[in-house]
Amino acid sequence: MINGKINVTWTKDDYESLQFQQHPNPYRGFVSDVESSSELKIALDVCYDIPKNISECLKQFDLKNMSCQIQRYAPGNYLPWHRDTYNTYRKYNAVTDTDNIVRIIVALHDSTPGQQLWIDEVFCHEHAGEYFGWKNDCLHMAANLSESFRYNLQITGTEAISVNG
């Protein structure tokens, strides 16, 4: 598992005021052992227009072909245990081998009780600026069982990660 902390250069107004759109197909891009997608409860909103003071943090990650989005999970929703397939990322970045793909989740705020990120068997208690991640097809899940929205910055890129500050 990858984890660390970066400087927080944003306020909650910077991400809460963004224009989110419902993810066009939240069931695409991962493989889950859950047998019926009708059992899944995924309400994931995304924003690709990242404010400059948030996108500044991207310089701290040594990744190539970076793609990012701000994600908003509505209360009462979750992504079940799954492995990412990176289909869209691979398509738009001409990446054929998933072995060097890295996925990073940066917490934009301190989590509240019920907001969860699990990577393998590790519960990641998130504080603003903390990041957690994995390479390739690591098993993980996210849930928002709280009463408020959960926001994070998702970064996908290739090669190993290092932090410059």
Image (cartoon, rainbow, N blue to C red):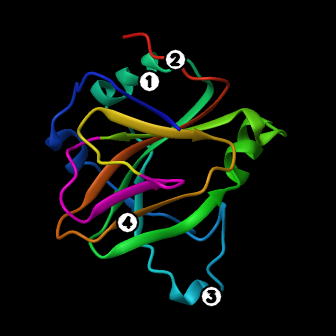
**In the image, is residue 40 above or below residue 47?**
below
Q: Which mark is residue 143?
A: 4
Label 3 residue SS: loop
Going by the numbered disc 1, the residue's amino acid type is Leu
Q: Earlier in the sequence, mark 2 or mark 3?
A: 3
> Are discs 3 and 4 less than 8 Å apart at CB?
no
The kind of residue tagged 3 is Ser
Magenta segment includes 72: no
Residue at figure coordinates x 77%, y 37% from the top left: 99
Residue 22: % across, % down? 43, 66
Q: How many neighbours does mark 4 have within 10 angstroms: few (below 14), some (14-19), or many (20 or more)?
A: many
**Distance CA(mark 2)–CA(mark 3):** 38 Å
* Quadrant of the snapshot with the C terminus: top left
| Residue 162: mark in rendering | 2
User: Can residue 17 be seen?
Assistant: no
Give the spatial CA distance, label 1 vs label 4.
Answer: 24 Å
In the depicted structure, whether residue 14 falls above or below residue 142: above
**Residue extent of the magenta highlight:** 108-122
- Residue 36 disc label: 3
Disc on the earlier residue, 1 or 3:
3
Label 1 sits on residue: 58
Q: Secondary structure at mark 1?
A: helix
Q: CB of mark 2 within 8 Å of CB of mark 1? A: no
Above or below, 159 against 34 in this view is above
The Cα–Cα distance between marks 1 and 3, rounded to whole angstroms, is: 36 Å
> Label 1 crowding class (10 Å Cα cut-off): few <14, some 14-19, many 20+?
some
